[in-house]
Structures are given as structure tokens and as C-alpha cells.
Image (tube, grey):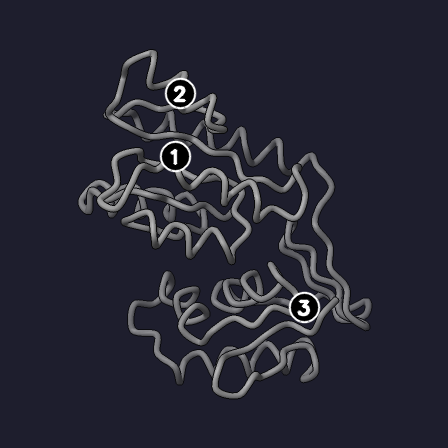
Amino acid sequence: MRILLVEDDRPLGQAVLGYLKSKQFSVDWAENLQQAKGFAATVPYAAVLLDLNLPDGEGLHLLPLLHESAAHPSARPTVIVVTARDQVSDRIRGLDAGADDYLVKPYDPEELLARLRAIERRRGSQASSVLTCDAVTIDLGREVVRNGTVPVVLTPKEWALLRVLASRPGQIFTRERLQEALYQWDATSDSNTLEVFISRLRRKLGSALIETVRGTGYRLTAL
């Protein structure tokens, strides 16, 4: 399950990031509102852990973008507000703004895990988002890819790239944005690494599936 962590407290953010990755979640970490908007505009998240007090604005300002960028209401991420504000009025305001849940700092990591597992179960019971292009079928919900009738095994880095590209078929993604997807797995990833993994995806899925847009980046052939 893909999660967006929006947290400006670096030690806390690093701790939560490490914990969630140890539980096999895929996590993007934004330290301010602008970074969070960049992630939310291009990646379909299942859940968002949203701090309210950010250096460049209030976290609740991210909610309209999360709702607008979802292809369908059922695809909207579940938003858990995670904040030190413990007043009932703050909780009501967050829920009225469109958040789904509220967790007050400091919290037990096991409580957060339980809430995320519940989200995962709910989403798993819904119909998966399945994309097809010629012989290739991409099931983003179950993380299953087939080329014809043959299952295709992808590495975590290959999946990280494909999820971004498949989130908006036909949309051009910059090299920088795709490198960010690799960066979460390897902090030394660079442009050469990106070329390697694009080449691997093409070998597994077909050379025509991923198009190079010169001087800009890549896009998945419109499905």
C-alpha cells in the first residue's frame, strides 16, 4: 500500500518512515505543503498521514487537491490527520474539511499500524484498478502485471516507477519525478539508474509501452 507521510519534524518523520517501511509499506515523505502537493498531484495514494502545522501552510490545504486528483471518489486516499493539537474543536475542523481520521501526538506506532491495516483491508475488498495496453495488464491494486497470460515479476524499484507512470497514462513525468520514486529505495539513485530501470521495464513489458519524450521525461502509452 502506498502512503504519503506529510511531516516537517525531521526526527519524527525519519522514525515513522523507517517503521512503516519495516512493515512493508511504500512511503513518500514530504516535509512541507509544497512537496506534498507535488506528490499528491502525480501519485495515487491509499493513505495520507497529514500533519497540520507545516512551515509553508496548514496541512488541511492539501485536502482539496487529494480529492480533485482522484480519478473516482472511491480512489480517494484515506486521510489521517496526525497532530499535537488535541482540542475537540481542532478534530471537528479537520473532519469537516475532509479528513477521515485523527491521531494525536505522541501516539503508539502500533495504533497507527492498526489503522493502516484497516485501510488496507477495506481497499483490498474493493475492485482493483486494472489498466490494459495491448497484451499488457497492470493491476495496481494487487500489484500484479501480466504480459499476455504470463505473469511478470517486477522488483520493488521497477514497481515504484511503473506505479507513477500508470497513475496517469499518457501524462509526461519528468526525469526528476521518476528519480524521486527510485530515491525512496536507494538514496544514491541518479539519472543513469533511471535509464537502467526504464530499460528493464521495456524488456519485460514491451518497448512500446513506455515512451521517451525528448528533453522532458517519460510517459506510459495511453491505455
Quick one: 77 or 120, which is closer to the camera? 77
Q: Residue 93 carries which label?
A: 2
Image quadrant in which you'd find residue 110 = top left
Give the Cα distance between marks 2 and 1.
9 Å
The x, y position of residue 209, in whole percent, is 68, 77
Q: Which of marks 2 and 1 is nearer the N terminus?
A: 1
Mark 2 element type: helix
Q: What residue sits right under mark 3 in the picture?
A: 152
Type of amino acid at the residue the image marks with label 2: Arg
Residue 141 at x, y = what percent? 64, 49
Image check: 145 left or right of 148? Answer: left
Discs 1/3, front: 1
**Disc 3 on helix, strand or loop?**
strand
Q: What residue do we see at 75% from left, 69% from top?
A: 136
Residue 121 relative to residue 80: left or right: right
Quick one: label 2 or label 3, which is nearer the N terminus?
Answer: 2
Figure check: 10 above or below 137 = above
Mark linked to residue 3: none
For marks 1 and 3 on the same chain, the one whose residue lies earlier in the sequence? 1
Report the residue marked by disc 1. Answer: 60
Amino acid type assigned to the residue bearing label 3 in the image: Val
Give yes or no for contact between labels 2 and 1 (Cβ–Cβ under 8 Å).
Answer: yes
